[in-house]
Image (cartoon, rainbow, N blue to C red):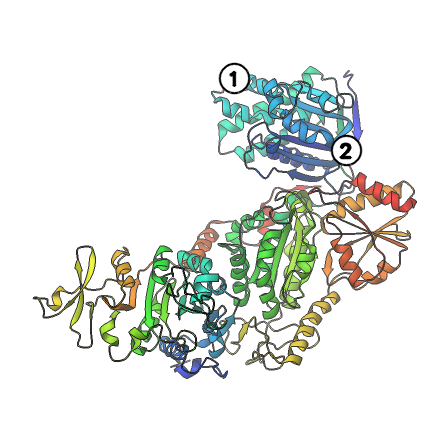
Amino acid sequence: MDKRKTTELENVVVRFTGDSGDGMQLTGTLFSNLSAILGNEISTFPDFPSEIRAPQGTVGGVSGFQVNLGAQKIYTPGDDADVLVAMNPAALKVNAKAVKKGGVIIFDTDSFQKSDFTKAGFVTENPFEELGISETIQLIPASLSSLTTASLEGFGLDTKTVLRSKNMFALGLICWLFNRPIDQASAFLTRKFGKKPSVLEANIKVLTDGFNYGHNLHLAVSTYTLSKSEDVVKGKYTLIAGNKATAWGLVAAAQKSGLQLFLGSYPITPATDIMQELALRKDLGVKVVQAEDEIAGISIALGAAFAGSLAATSTSGPGLALKSEAIGLAVMAELPIVIVDVMRGGPSTGLPTKTEQTDLLQALYGRNGESPVVVMAAGSPDDCFHYAYMASKIALEHMTPVILLTDTFLGNGTSLWQLPKLSELPEIKPNYAQPGMEGLNVTARNETTKVRYWTIPGTEGFAQRNGGLEKDYNTGSITSEPLNHEKMVATRQAKIDYINNYIPELEVEGDKDADLLVIGWGSTHGHLISAVNSLNKNGNKVALAHFNYINPLPKNAEEVIKRYKKVLVCELNSGQFATYLRSKVPGEYLQYNKVQGQPFKVAELEEAIQLIINK
Amino acid sequence: MESIIKQYTAKDYKSDQSVRWCPGCGDYALLNTLQKVMAELGIPPHETAVVSGIGCSSRLPYYSTAYGFHTIHGRGAAVATGIKVANPRLTVWQITGDGDCLAIGGNHFIHSVRRNVDMNVLIFNNQIYGLTKGQYSPTTKKGFITKSSPFGTVERPFRPAELTFGARGAFFGRLLDVDLKSSQMVMMAAAKHKGTSVVECLVNCVIFNDGAHSWLSEKENRYDRLIILEHGKPMIFGKNNDKGLVLDGFNLKVVTIGENGITENDILVHDAQCEDTTLQMKLAMMEGPDFPVAVGVIRDVADESYDEAVENQILEIQSKSKIKTFDDLIDSCEQWEM
């Protein structure tokens, strides 16, 4: 009988790290996919360096991929790792702090040589001791490079190709550690490398050898099993990244509304995937213009909105700044457009590959004049689909720009997504000018909703002159008459405010009867609900109100907030949502803020919330 | 049912808004010419979009019955691109000025030309900022005194033709506001050209730069000082049609027909459709007093337009792809039952 212990886990966090050329993203993705197929809950988050290829073996070039596998509902990619795969000392150095006490580190001994230590900035030849972790972790040394070389002997591959396969050896080892059958991984590899039989064969050989290596050597560590999650609603699932989900949400909205989807965009980290994903969708008639700059990206999209398309633009913080004047034009011309801001660390170029919620006030207020727009935020990677769809619906039905905030964490992270059908999604009915309204002026609107009628070029009887100048409420002609301007300002605001009749009410999660209400918005939902659930499980009483609709706020926001004795706003900035709430629902708001370019950790949230409870 | 082809007149393209340019502004003539051209083209106002940025010229959409969009400073080219690519069946006119197009909108201008979006770009070039009341523009002559260059500019001006050719423009025309007949011919050719048609409109600002083109526009000597270029026609000009252009080595030279044995047969014939821009560039760069200034159609080369290419690629992919609907897309992704 096998003497090694097998531990049954509720969830496990694995972090794959190495040089950006080491294939860690692929390894992590494969491991996630095959775990999802085995019935686990999944949440992943990659951590890229902003350098494409920093010098090999240096800390600047370390790329990481973290996955959290759950035998029950999980909401985040996890805090610290149970298992770290470190392909070199630099990867170890960058990630050592993110390993749990008692965790496992698998490392490539071939890359843990004197010169590698120097490159990574270690001064001794024992990096584990130098990092002060040698007592608290279990090590699995494996000479990945030489084992891979041995595995591929006789394949006739060049050294470079051989060494590039060492990530598969690591994957095999991880599969063994978690008792994952590797046939699923082989199937994924077949799909990925099917066109290159020699590469495919080599990868599968190394993967299998990696698995067997762990098994045969009876490595002196416990292995783990993770049961199927019972919390999953039965159905068909895939793993989806937030940016892809956003792109697909727009695609779905276009088909549902019967419109052509048109994206004007400019490459910017971390939003570029949205443009790339849509550029693939020519089969569904999506038009994508890669513009000469951010301003052109939105201006071209706005032209498409004027022409009658479902128009969108995708960007990140610096790009949103450049687009502000054109967003103002969309406000003034009352045209529908979806602006997706995948937030990153700022200001300026800031931390291009890191996550932050620091564009909120820019989205709300970053324009000249009284310029209200709808602002909403997605809560998880798969959620991006829903909110991109709803952003499109609101833009088209209320003739307004809508800013959808996601961020690096959502855009690049993945979560399980139950596959939708178009027929299950809500109807979208753009506010078109109707036959019989011929000759209507450019400011003509539904007097209840204040929504302007959309007139589409090419349609006889509806030609109008629109633009950025103030227009007369009654005639649509340009005018700077003082009282008319004030009326138009109020009308544009009323139109946005009225949208709260169409958005869902704010729900309270956790313990509704608590004294303390934790408030969050956007991408932090997973971390906040995990912390709140855990605290409640340990005998505390905490409620959570998480906002996805920010402007306008849900109708019952004030009533919910006023119900609680203490309110704590947690966000990845210096307090932007708290500032906004103070202006909308005056009262006392405590704050917990983090601006490190990193998501929250559940543990630090628990600690912070516990402090407030104990006060 | 009997099909009726409606005959349009310029009036069908005139809106009820009162035109608010300064009395004597060259923009009036261009507006009238444009409306005549629109009527002659016979494309109904509702299938036409007129897009502008900011500046005096950019007020033009309000005076038209077409779908109009008065956008923001410099971005007219980008907005017009979006309109045309979204709906290639629309005829799109972009109205812009030397500041709007070549300063703040310079990037959008060169890129829309490079892409060859099928639209007609009328650059109202009065070599000055009019709406902000008299600052120098990117086409103001070096040394010129304006409110923002009280001691004369020290900047070199752009020449719109060079910029257009540099951006690989397939159509470049030039017109003079007061010369109505040739103006109409150039605008018509621009409208008929598929791709970005750039037309530099030499226009007079009576308030801040009066007479900028007076050397050329002065009635007395106008036809001795400008040459109207048309594809396939000899480059003959002059009040008496007795002057012409010939090649002298690599350069152009003005000759008089009947002098030194020169006959009409010696005069160059204009080839606007030549891919190579060398001679077209020389023609576009001609300046007085030694040379006439070229108006007319200087370059008019056929090429696929961007909006057409975008549509064609979509059709091609659609004919091959199994994904026809959103539900097909969902079915196509890696998925499993849980």
- Residue A380: x %, y % from top left: 71, 48
Tell me which chain the residue with mark 2 is part of: A
Q: Quadrant of residue A453?
A: bottom right
Q: What residue do we see at 27% from left, 60% from top?
A: B280
Q: Is residue A201 above or below residue A543?
A: above
Q: Nearer the viewer, mark 2 or mark 1?
A: 1
Q: Is residue A473 above or below residue B109?
A: below
Q: Which residue is mark 2?
A: A227
Q: Which residue is mark 1?
A: A153
Count of numbered marks = 2
Category of crowding for the residue at label 2, using alpha-carbon neighbours closer than 10 angstroms: few (below 14), some (14–19), many (at least 20): some
Res. A487 in view: yes
* Left or right: B169 as drawn, with respect to A408: left
Q: Is residue A70 above or below residue A120?
A: below
Of the pair A584 and A12, the residue shown nearer to us: A584
Instruction: Look at the numbered disc 2 and give the secondary structure of its residue.
Output: loop
- Residue A265: x %, y % from top left: 54, 54
Three-letter amino acid code of the residue under disc 2? Ser
Three-letter amino acid code of the residue under disc 1? Glu
Q: Estimate the spatial distance between the alpha carbons at disc 2 and disc 1, rounded to whole Å.
A: 37 Å
Of the pair B231 and A237, the residue shown nearer to us: B231
Q: Is residue B277 above or below residue A486?
A: above
Q: Determine which of the numbered discs, if any, sits on residue B262 in the image.
A: none
